Structure formats: C-alpha cells, structure tokens
C-alpha cells in the first residue's frame, strides 16, 4: 500500500511538471525586458489558467539543456524561444517537434519567413519576433522623385524602387536643394558594415560572402562610387541616423530601426519608413528572426496555448510598444496606435512582405565577427574613398573572408547557404 501511495505521488508530480509550461528563452534577458515578459505571461496565465515559468538562457546553454533533456528522455523545457540559427541547429539534430500541422486562427504570418522555419520537411519553429534595418524618408523628398518612380513605389517596395532609382533620386535632391540629402551611418560605431554585407552585396550578387570577388560585385562597387557623389560628407562622423534626419541634414537615411526610432517618434508626421531598394538579384536586407519551438516528445497541449498567445496581434503589439521587436503577423499593424511606432512597424512589415526579398542573417562568427565587418568597411574605404581598382581590392580581401569561416568552422549565412 505504501509503495502504491508513493507511486501515485510520483505520477502526480510528473503530471504537474508536464502540465506547466517551462518556457526557456535566449531573448528578453535584460532586466526590463524580462520584467515585461513576466507581466505579459502572468496576465495570460490569469485569463487562461495556464501556469508558465519564464527561464532565461545563454545561447549555448539553451542548446545544451535541450540536448541533455532529449538524451535523458525527460522533457522539462516544453517551450523555447531562440534565434532562427539556433532553432535550425536544434531542429537539424532532431530535438524539436514538427509544427507543420499547427494552425492559428486570425493569424497571417509574413510569408517571407516561412521557408526559414523548416529543416527538411519539418517545420521546427513558428516565427515570433523580428528586428531589421530600413530606410527613413522625409516626406519633402517625394517632391524630387525621378521620372517613373512614385511615392507608392517607394513606400510599398515595388519592382520600380531600385538602387538605380535611389541614385537618380539622390542626384535630383542634390541638384535642386544644392546639398546632398542621402545619409548612411559611417561613423566608428555606426552599422555601415551591415549595409555592405547584408544589403547591397546580396542585392547585386545574391550572396553576402561567397560572391565577394565576383564580376557582379565589381558592378556593385562601381555603383557605390557613383552613389557616394550624392551622400552627405559628414556621414563619416554619424553613428546613428536619427539625429541627422531631425536636424534636416539629410532627407533619406538607412540604419537599424532602433537607430531611426527617435526621429520617427518625435516627428511622426514628417517621416515614413520604407523598404530598402532592390538590386539586379532582388531586395537584400538583414533580418534578426526569433522563433518559438516545442521540444520533441513534449506534451504540446499547454505550450501551444502559450505559443498561440505570443503570436497573437495583442501580444505582438504589446511587445513592440514595450520592447521594440517588430510583429511577424500582419494583423498586429491594425492594433498599433497612430504615431511613430506604427510608422516603423508598417515599414518593417512591408519590407519583409516584398516578393523579391533576399533575407540575410548575420554570420555566426563569434569573436571573428569584428574582422568580418571590418573587411567590408576596408573594401569600401579603399574602393570608394581611395579610388583603388575594385577588382584588385576584392580579389585581395576575398580570401580573408573565406578564411574567417574556415577558422571558426562556421556555416555560411543565408542567403549563401541556400546556394549549395
């Protein structure tokens, strides 16, 4: 009788563990973000009765924990959040459940992200959050559009919104306002390297790294030389583009959305956020994509309720307003109050919904990431500012790029990895 009682108690404890959602996340780790998530999940728990514990992990620690639980056959973490790269690694190792059959009502996920949620034929995560880079336009700049390009082309990212069109627009602006009106963050702490490897390179070559020294790359560098005739010379001192926009030094600027935010929030009636232009190969841009997964062999009942909530327009809007990650569901846009955040979110979702998207992920080079970034900046300085021969410069630096991936034994980032 005593053994039976102990057995029943153990069964009850196991059932309790599995009825609870133990949510392991590499995201929302800063104190303010963690506090927000605990409040958000707590409010959902009160309404739904689902018990949730929010647990923060470092990237490598989450992978180790999920792997250990799978090998032990005892799943405690039954919902996880991580970057796309981490979830794909876990999925490729067979640690994550296939979510192909999971559907949510009233939810239109950005189609561009869908192909990155699969490992083979299995859908290993559901998109949750995104962060990205985009262009901010002072509405006065639309008075100087080149022939054949409309305001709606730019705002919606149509096939007419190209880098050639940007060049003509920048030329018009400079000729008619008597000063350069295009700006990029080339300062020492600016994110200019992200534009080079994750935007202009894939737009012209279809890749970030593997076509660094291609013929198409030479075309791109020749284009950059021409474009920089119309870029504000003070850009080498700018780390963020919000202040140059607010000061009226430029009308068109590219940067990370977090570094454009202040200008948009302070003067929402003056600016619009738009997709980046497209090049000969498509519209390249960097996405930081966060997903939600359920580990294999976990009971999905309660975790899917939380996953459903976290991807709802309600939760997506709350996360944008409090933390700054952008929605991955189109219905969230209608819930965002009018103002700067809505302008930012509309631009981000429009960009990620363009049919010619070439989504790029930042390479996972660890401590070598700085060398990777600096190599692109060095190529730019030598070719555009110092007028060195593009073919010679990129031939010299291409081997350095290739060697970085070999030294770290890092996989190629998207879109490069999809070429093989």
Image: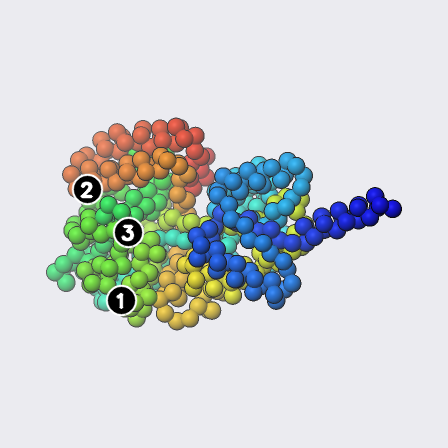
Q: Position of residue 238 (x, y in %)?
A: 22, 52
Q: Which mark is residue 139?
A: 1
What's the distance in space between the residues labelled 3 and 1, CA to CA? 19 Å
In terms of sequence position, does the residue under pointer 1 or pointer 2 come before the other? Answer: 1
Q: Position of residue 131 (x, y in %)?
A: 41, 53
Residue position for label 3: 163
Q: Position of residue 224 (x, y in %)?
A: 23, 45
Vertical arrangement, residue 90 with respect to residue 138, above or below? above
Q: Which mark is residue 293?
A: none
In terms of sequence position, does the residue under pointer 3 or pointer 1 come before the other? Answer: 1
Relative placement, left or right, of 355 versus 256 is: right
Asked if residue 256 can be seen in this view, the reply is yes
In this orientation, which residue lies closer to the viewer: 171 or 340? Answer: 340
Vertical arrangement, residue 31 with respect to residue 201, above or below? below
Residue position for label 2: 384
Number of dots carrying numbers: 3
């Amino acid at each position: 009788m005593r053994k039976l009682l102990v057995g029943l108690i153990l069964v009850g404890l196991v059932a309790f563990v599995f009825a609870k959602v133990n949510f392991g996340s590499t995201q929302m780790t800063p104190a303010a973000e963690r506090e927000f998530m605990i409040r958000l999940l707590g409010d959902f728990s009160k309404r739904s009765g689902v018990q949730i514990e929010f647990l923060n992990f470092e990237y490598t620690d989450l992978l180790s924990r999920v792997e250990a639980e799978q090998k032990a056959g005892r799943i405690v973490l039954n919902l996880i959040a991580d970057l796309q790269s981490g979830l794909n690694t876990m999925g490729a190792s067979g640690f994550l459940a296939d979510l192909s059959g999971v559907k949510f009502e009233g939810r239109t996920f950005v189609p561009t992200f869908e192909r990155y949620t699969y490992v083979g034929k299995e859908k290993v995560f559901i998109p949750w959050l995104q962060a990205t880079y985009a262009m901010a336009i002072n509405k006065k700049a639309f008075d100087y559009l080149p022939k054949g390009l409309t305001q709606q082309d730019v705002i919606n990212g149509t096939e007419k919104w190209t880098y050639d069109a940007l060049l003509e627009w920048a030329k018009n602006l400079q000729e008619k306002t008597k000063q350069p009106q295009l700006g990029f963050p080339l300062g020492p702490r600016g994110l200019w390297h992200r534009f080079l490897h994750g935007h202009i390179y894939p737009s012209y070559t279809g890749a970030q790294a593997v076509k660094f020294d291609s013929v198409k790359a030479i075309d791109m560098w020749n284009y950059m030389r021409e474009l920089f005739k119309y870029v504000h010379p003070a850009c080498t001192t700018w780390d963020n583009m919000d202040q140059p926009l607010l000061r009226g030094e430029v009308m068109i600027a590219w940067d990370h959305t977090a570094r454009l935010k202040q200008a948009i929030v302070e003067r929402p009636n003056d600016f619009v956020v738009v997709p980046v232009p497209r090049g000969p190969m498509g519209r390249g841009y960097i996405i930081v994509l966060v997903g939600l997964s359920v580990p294999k062999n976990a009971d999905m009942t309660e975790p899917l309720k939380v996953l459903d909530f976290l991807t709802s327009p309600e939760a997506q809007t709350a996360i944008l307003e409090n933390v700054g990650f952008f929605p991955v569901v189109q219905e969230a846009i209608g819930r965002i109050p009018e103002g700067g955040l809505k302008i930012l979110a509309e631009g981000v979702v429009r960009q990620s919904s363009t049919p010619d998207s070439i989504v790029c992920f930042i390479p996972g080079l660890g401590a070598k990431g700085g060398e990777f970034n600096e190599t692109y900046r060095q190529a730019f300085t030598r070719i555009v500012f110092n007028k060195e021969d593009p073919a010679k410069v990129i031939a010299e630096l291409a081997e350095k790029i290739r060697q970085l991936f070999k030294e770290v034994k890092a996989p190629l980032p998207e879109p490069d990895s999809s070429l093989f």
